Amino acid sequence: MIPEVSLIISVFNQLDYTKRCLSCVEKTLRGKITYEVLIVDDGSNEETINYLRSLKDPHYVTFNAESKGFAKNNNLASSQARGKYLCLLNNDVFVEGDWLSPMIKVFQKEEKVGLVGNVQRLVFSNRFDHMGVVFGPSGNPRHYGQWFKKIKFRGEVRKWSAVTAACCVVRRADFLAIGGFDEIYLNGCEDVDLCLRFNRQGCNHYVVHDSIVLHVKGASAGRKLFNDRNSEILLKRWGQEIRAEESITDQVPHARNYLYRGFVRPFSTHFFKWLEALLIYFRLKRL
């Protein structure tokens, strides 16, 4: 039977997280939707490899002899997937409740859909981390809702300029047609780049705000080693276009997001950027 959804998970060690991730997937999806789980092991240790080799249908595992990174792993698995939809899922994301079906329904209700994401709450702090992605005045992407204590837009399916690929759904045909992730990125910014390419094709990205999952975030060793390099590539490629388009559209929600960050994490904000956000939020300045 051809599955409706192919879940794609890139794994590098973190066996306990992987076990919990897969257990949550089975608990929430078994008997409710036809699915397969395509796992790409990115050069894990023997303990992880032995566990992955023990998995049975609907799990299918590819083993890399050496680490290739998130973009290449997801592209490889997507080329092998059979489902109409791809669900890209980090192995440190733990799904719960009716999280997937409302995401798929967006494709059935809306036209020109790129990616559909959901709300993500951090495991250890219990604060929210992602309700969508907005772009700042300089073109930098930020997770809307980071460090929020309460969920925004409950009951809504809301458009955003981008969403994170830690947990998202995309039509397999669309993902392959657009070329998948750009493999120049190493474990960062490939999802934002993908969203921007869909944007230029007239597609919209959505977040289902009643689909909430837990995310450890940055669990894999070396996850942040290439952050500066990835950001430099992204802004060199897209910066001018982002500042002319997404930054304009996102200026008020970005300002609201940055102002909140200044209250809860003042050491991580720049005073003059915070002041600029204040002026934008009260419509005293426009980009």
Image (cartoon, rainbow, N blue to C red):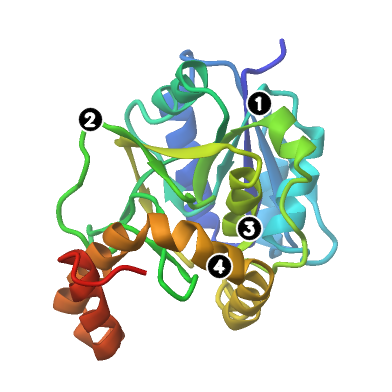
Read off the residue under disc 4.
Answer: 220
Choose the circle earlier in sequence order: 4 or 1: 1
- Residue lying at 74% horizontally and 53% vertically, measured from the top left: 73
Image quadrant assignment for residue 221: bottom right
Q: Residue furthest right?
A: 65
Give the Cα separation between the discs numbered 3 and 2.
28 Å
Read off the residue under disc 3.
Answer: 193
Work out whether 235 lies above or below 92: below
Q: Residues within 10 Å of mark 4 (few under 14, many from 20)?
A: some
* Marks 1 and 2 close (CB-CB < 8 Å): no
Give the Cα separation between the discs numbered 2 and 4.
32 Å
Q: Position of 16 compared to 71: left or right? A: left
Q: Amino acid at mark 1?
A: Pro
* Marks 4 and 1 close (CB-CB < 8 Å): no
| Disc 1 secondary structure class | loop
Read off the residue under disc 2.
Answer: 155
- Residue lying at 63% horizontally and 70% vertically, measured from the top left: 234
Read off the residue under disc 1.
Answer: 58
| Disc 4 secondary structure class | loop
Q: Amino acid at mark 2?
A: Gly
